[in-house]
Image (cartoon, rainbow, N blue to C red):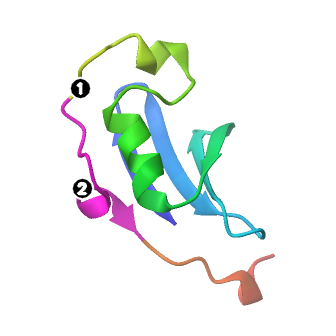
Amino acid sequence: MWRYRTDIGTFWIRQNITGEFELWLNESLLGACEDAAEAAQRVSNCTTGYSGWDCRGQVKEPRSLKGWVSFEIDTEHRT
């Protein structure tokens, strides 16, 4: 899972059970990609499907996952 915080909210990239990488903004699913790098590019290219972000046209957000925070979720111990 990856997280990137912006002034409009937090983007998340999460892998689902089918292997696709879902792009979220806060708690809203924006779409799914074949790989996580493509999802990160959608944020930097302003092609997320969320008009409040996409209308910006150009942003300084990273084009790759290097600028995102990566972490694992411990699904065994979730309550």
Residue 62 located within the stretch drawn in magenta:
yes
The amino acid type, in three-letter code, at marker 2 is: Gly
- Residues rendered magenta in the picture: 60-70
- Percent across and percent down for residue 37 are 40, 57
Q: Residue furthest bottom?
A: 76
x then y, percent, for residue 18: 77, 68
* Other residues around mark 2 within 10 Å, as few (<14) / some (14–19) / many (≥20): few
Residue 70 sits in quarter: bottom left
Quadrant (top left/top right/bottom left/bottom right) for the C terminus? bottom right
Residue on which disc 2 sits:
67
Image quadrant where residue 75 sits = bottom right
Q: Real-space Cα distance between discs 2 and 1?
A: 13 Å
Q: Which mark is residue 59?
A: 1
Compared to residue 1, the image places residue 79 above or below, namely below
**On the picture, is 23 further left or further right than 3?**
right
Query: Callout 1: few (<14), some (14-19), or many (20+) C-alpha neighbours within 10 Å?
Result: few
